[in-house]
């Protein structure tokens, strides 16, 4: 599947975001090496700290739909921003656990043609891994 197709799917999925407080919809789409597609949108809560970002909803759904962690080849994040949207730090850390170094991460704008492409190492250099947990024993 082409990146442009994934961006279009994510763009169409923006309307599903539950954003009664911020009115700031975000959508994410992941494609795995088996051709499976996973979608996520941000879901807000009146207790703001309970809000869940689209990136995490999407990646958690990829785990929920499989018996083991899928190999995500492409991960697209889109928002109604004038420039390509940027994931928060918490989402970047989750991405570091559930994506791999070869995953193509694309940040996009629903309003313009602006997009940026990153690797995991570029979007979150020196990320925390399970190896640090094992080495801390």
Image (cartoon, rainbow, N blue to C red):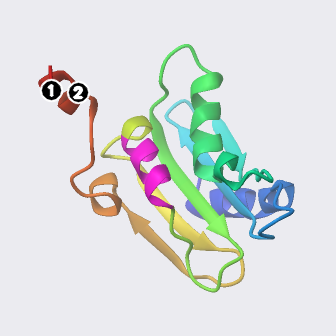
Farthest-out residue, front: 47
Magenta highlight: main SS:
helix
Residue at image location 45% in from the left, 57% down from the top: 105
- Which label is found at residue 133? 2
Gap between marks 2 and 1, in whole Å?
A: 5 Å
Q: Is residue 27 left or right of residue 103?
A: right
Q: Quadrant of residue 137?
A: top left
Task: Tell me: residue 94, above or below residue 82.
Answer: above
Residue 55 in the image, given as x and y percentages of width and height: 58, 50
Q: Which residues are magenta?
A: 88-96
Contact? badges 2 and 1 (CB < 8 Å): yes
Residue at image location 50% in from the left, 63% down from the top: 106
Residue 9 visible in the displayed image: yes
Residue 46 in the image, given as x and y percentages of width and height: 80, 53
Residue 3 in the image, given as x and y percentages of width and height: 57, 60
Residue 36 visible in the displayed image: no
Task: Tell me: residue 43, above or below residue 110.
Answer: above
Q: Nearer the viewer, residue 115 or 25?
A: 25
Q: Is residue 91 left or right of residue 52?
A: left
- Please say whether residue 91 is one of the residues in the magenta stretch: yes
Q: Nearer the viewer, residue 136 or 110?
A: 136
Residue 54 in the image, given as x and y percentages of width and height: 65, 52
Farthest-out residue, top: 67
How busy is the neighbourhood of tag 2: few (under 14 within 10 Å), some, or many (20 plus)?
few
Q: Quadrant of residue 113?
A: bottom right
Q: Is residue 75 left or right of residue 17?
A: left
Residue at image location 27% in from the left, 55% down from the top: 121
- Which label is found at residue 136? 1
């Amino acid at each position: 599947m082409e990146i442009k197709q994934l961006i279009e799917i994510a763009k169409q999925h923006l309307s599903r975001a539950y954003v009664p407080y911020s009115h700031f919809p975000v959508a994410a789409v992941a494609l795995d090496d088996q051709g499976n597609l996973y979608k996520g949108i941000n879901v807000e809560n009146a207790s703001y700290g309970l809000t869940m970002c689209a990136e995490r909803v999407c990646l958690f759904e990829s785990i929920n739909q499989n018996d083991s962690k899928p190999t995500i080849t492409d991960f697209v994040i889109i928002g109604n921003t004038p420039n390509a949207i940027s994931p928060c730090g918490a989402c970047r850390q989750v991405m570091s656990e559930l994506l791999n170094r070869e995953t193509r991460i694309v940040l996009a704008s629903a309003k313009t043609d602006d997009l940026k492409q990153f690797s995991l190492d570029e979007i979150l250099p020196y990320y925390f891994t399970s190896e640090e947990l094992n080495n801390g024993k």
